[in-house]
Image (cartoon, helix red, strand yellow):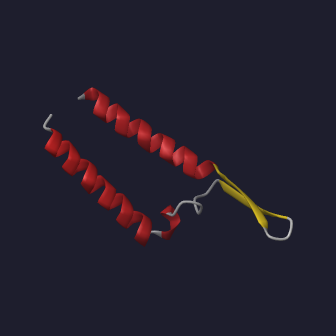
Amino acid sequence: MNPGRILVALGLAAVIAGLAIMYVPALRPGRLPGDISFPVGGSGRIYIPLGTSILLSVLLTVIFAVLNRR
């Protein structure tokens, strides 16, 4: 495959992902269902991004599976 086409496709995917994160509040990292956040002490907070990790894992698996077929 032509490297130029791959770069254009990756650029378009990055733009679409950026627009989705900007305009869809539910897609912002840290606000997905399954993310755990709770206060510790007076000013501390523990954050465990389970939902975000699962979503990224699924997306990267699909992307690499598609790229591996070519």
Name of the residue lying farthest toward the right: 41
Residue drawn at (59%, 63%) of the image: 31
Q: Is residue 3 above or below residue 14?
A: above
* Quadrant of the rendered image containing residue 29: bottom right
Name of the residue lying farthest toward the top: 69
Residue drawn at (59%, 61%) of the image: 30
Give how far across and how far down residue 16 sits, in percent. Answer: 32, 60
Give how far across and how far down residue 20 sits, in percent. Answer: 39, 64
Give how far across and how far down residue 55 sits, in percent. Answer: 51, 48
Q: Is residue 66 above or below residue 11?
A: above
Residue drawn at (29%, 34%) of the image: 67
User: Is 48 situated left or right of 38 in this image?
Assistant: left
* Quadrant of the rendered image containing residue 63: top left
Residue drawn at (32%, 56%) of the image: 14
Quarter of the image with the N terminus in it = top left
Q: Is residue 43 above or below residue 35?
A: below
Quarter of the image with the C terminus in it = top left
Give how far across and how far down residue 51 sits, in percent. Answer: 59, 51
**Total number of numbered labels?**
0
User: Is 38 situated left or right of 19 in this image?
Assistant: right
